[in-house]
Amino acid sequence: MRCSTHKFGGASVRDAEAIRRVASLLVDQLGPDEKAVVVVSAMGKTTNALEDVWRAEGARRKELWDATVAKHVAVAVELDVAGPLQARMAACWEEAIRAEASGDNNAAYDAFVAAGELASTTLVAGWLSKAGLPATWWDVRETLQTAGPHRAARVDEGTLNEAGASLRGRLSEPTGRQVVVTQGFIGRHSDGSTSTLGREGSDYSAALLAVAVGAQEVTIWKDVPGMMNADPKRHPEAVTVPRVDHGEALELSYYGASVIHPRTVKPLQQAGLALWVKSFVDPDGPATCIDAFPGLIPDVPMFIWRDDQMWLEVFTADGSFLAEDHLTTVFGALDESGIHVRLMQQSATHFGLLADRDEAKRTSLTSGLGRAFQVECTRDLVLLTVRHGSREDLERLTGGRTVQVEQRAGATWRRVLV
């Protein structure tokens, strides 16, 4: 029995017409007896809209929430699959309000934003069934049990086989296609509350679910033709890299390559699974296969830009030497805040790190460090990573800009730019 996992991002399900295209693509791609787990993100910019709901207060919050619900209902009506959509979103609202009343704002955030995935998957599952694919809706919180802080939860990857038993049972029909539509990005803590894996975490969800059900491969469907050596919006000359080794993909995702989530590759590498990155716009066009290709180096340099970065300079309040016990505190606070460190360096008295700008996480870090530390923040920075390139590439791309930090490690050059 062939089993595959497919992940569709927000752009691929942004409206009714896009959902119809997803159905057509799956009808063409799946074999006659293939079993598939289809992982779906929230529609379009829904997560951003739900973050606005979470930040709002009073009547304005309910107004924004109702507008988000209405948008999904309109798509459901167009697809004629209204069904349980409103009940699922109402449950998210109630969970979020309860969490906030208990004083846990991060749990409330997770409950609010989870509504996007729960809604989009309801729409997709309903339309797939109408399109002739035997599709059922699955609550991923029944499979992905999480721990750690809300907004940046962790999954114990060692328990995936056990966790996937129920989902494998759902895909156990001996003949014929079967599709299970489920959510990316979310899970469930042991206390029953909804958790999230961090922004853009749906790719990671797809990898975890592929391992949990014993899939043969994973396909992430994007609006670009596979993994490219640079962002084509910034580099019109960018080309698709057809094959990438698991280890190289790990490096690129760590450095900020936006095509895959940083945690996506490791569980697939350990399970020996291939990850395909394909375009839903041109399913038979250029694509990238990420698999075990030992020693393979891309034949073009890789350019990775990260805008809107913040540099955090951490030092002791009394100006003392930054010792190992201090660093234990620093890294513990980073973990609790959910900050993903993109670059770091240390001196005798200071520890510096670069991260995506997020004022809430910065505030959480400062609070977690306590009075023994101080934190200075520099905003509006840009990180450029050049991998398998040359100093000439680096100079050409950064000429005329002020370099705040430069690092080189093997085949990788990195510059933090003002």
Image: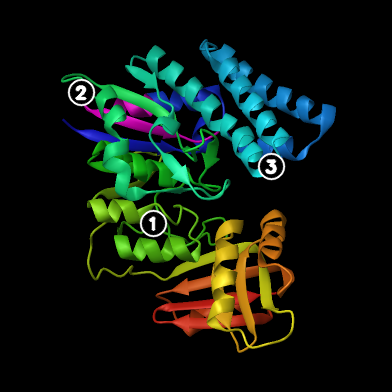
> Marks 3 and 1, how far apart in space?
42 Å
Given residues 187 and 232, the one toward you in this image is 187
Q: Position of residue 307 (x, y in %)?
A: 63, 62
Tag of residue 304: none
Tag of residue 32: 2
Q: Position of residue 106 (x, y in %)?
A: 64, 44
In the displayed structure, would residue 57 be above or below residue 382? above
> Marks 2 and 1, how far apart in space?
30 Å
* Closer to viewer: mark 2 or mark 3: 3
* Residue at which label 1 appears: 240
Q: Would residue 257 be found to the left or right of residue 76 on screen?
A: left
Reply yes or no: does residue 118 show up in magenta.
Answer: no
Specify which label sits upstream in the sequence, 2 or 1. 2
In the displayed structure, would residue 322 be above or below residue 86? below
Q: Amino acid at mark 2?
A: Pro
Q: Position of residue 395 (x, y in %)?
A: 56, 82
* Residue at which label 3 appears: 105
Q: Is residue 290 visible?
A: no
Q: Secondary structure at mark 3?
A: helix
Given residues 241 and 33, the one toward you in this image is 33
| Magenta segment boundaries in residue numbering | 24-42
Q: Amino acid at mark 3?
A: Asn
Q: Would residue 203 be found to the left or right of residue 383 on screen?
A: left
